[in-house]
Image: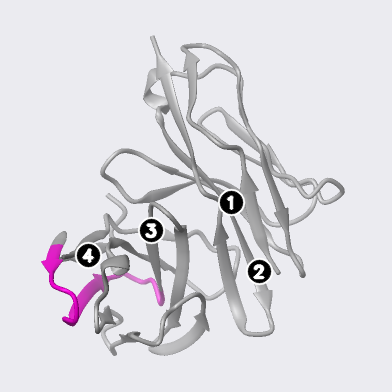
Amino acid sequence: GNSVTQMEGPVTLSEEAFLTINCTYTATGYPSLFWYVQYPGEGLQLLLKATKADDKGSNKGFEATYRKETTSFHLEKGSVQVSDSAVYFCALSDLVNTGNQFYFGTGTSLTVIP
Amino acid sequence: DSGVTQTPKHLITATGQRVTLRCSPRSGDLSVYWYQQSLDQGLQFLIQYYNGEERAKGNILERFSAQQFPDLHSELNLSSLELGDSALYFCASSVGDSLSYEQYFGPGTRLTVT
């Protein structure tokens, strides 16, 4: 079945460090892939998405490329800021025989220290 | 502010009871999704409605049911509550039914079953 596996946290980085959060997926169809961010006490917000192989999603300095050959969608940012501290979720949406399905990774907590 | 509202914000109830969670989608959005976020199971997709009709089902228990009304607001009914149902319940909405549409999440309802 479909699933999303993402890097365990928590991750602690110094400001301006490079960030990578790994995400791999299994899917039976042609999924769309997403990264969502959850700030403390809030709901999830879409950070970026990619709907087909080789698409690159980007937003606020974050990037992720949909790699079908490695079934991955790793999140990267060249220089993190304290305000990036949050929980990041990799997600997948796919059409299966029972209809649309949505799968989320377990979340990776990021803390950026000044 | 995502434009999705959820009430109540917090709910404390006893085992065996029944509760109703309410969600109002963003203006113009036709799809509503319900998710359960718990520490042990992460974020789980429960069910999707589109323009009043059930569109997809995820890991929703038989004790749980949902509906979407003509004004597009949705309610999630949880009955015969168990301690393990304690979680944060999110509602999300999107403009259409496509898997690639961005979902906008509400702030959640925190349910505590004692």
Which label number is shown at residue A94?
Answer: 2
Amino acid type, callout 3? Gln
Real-space Cα separation, disc 3 to disc 1, in angstroms: 17 Å
Residue A1 horizontal/vertical position (percent): 71, 69
Looking at the image, is mark 1 or mark 2 earlier in the sequence?
Answer: 1
Labelled pair 3, 4 in contact (Cβ < 8 Å): no
Residue B56 horizontal/vertical position (percent): 52, 82
Q: Is residue B92 left or right of residue B12?
A: right
Pointer 3 residue? B37
Looking at the image, is mark 3 or mark 4 earlier in the sequence?
Answer: 4
Q: Is residue B102 left or right of residue B38?
A: right
Real-space Cα separation, disc 3 to disc 2, in angstroms: 20 Å
Q: Is residue B8 magenta?
A: no
Helix, strand or loop status at disc 1: strand
Real-space Cα separation, disc 1 to disc 2, in angstroms: 12 Å
Pointer 4 residue? B6
Amino acid type, callout 1? Phe
Labelled pair 1, 2 in contact (Cβ < 8 Å): no
- What is the chain identity of the residue bearing mark 2? A
Q: Is residue B13 magenta?
A: yes
- Which marked residue is nearer to the observer: mark 3 or mark 1? 3
- Quadrant the C terminus of chain A occupies: top left
- Which marked residue is nearer to the observer: mark 3 or mark 4? 3
Pointer 1 residue? A34
Image: magenta residue range:
B11-32
Whether discs 2 and 4 lie on one chain: the answer is no
Q: Residue at x 51, y 33 (%)?
A: A9
- What is the chain identity of the residue bearing mark 1? A
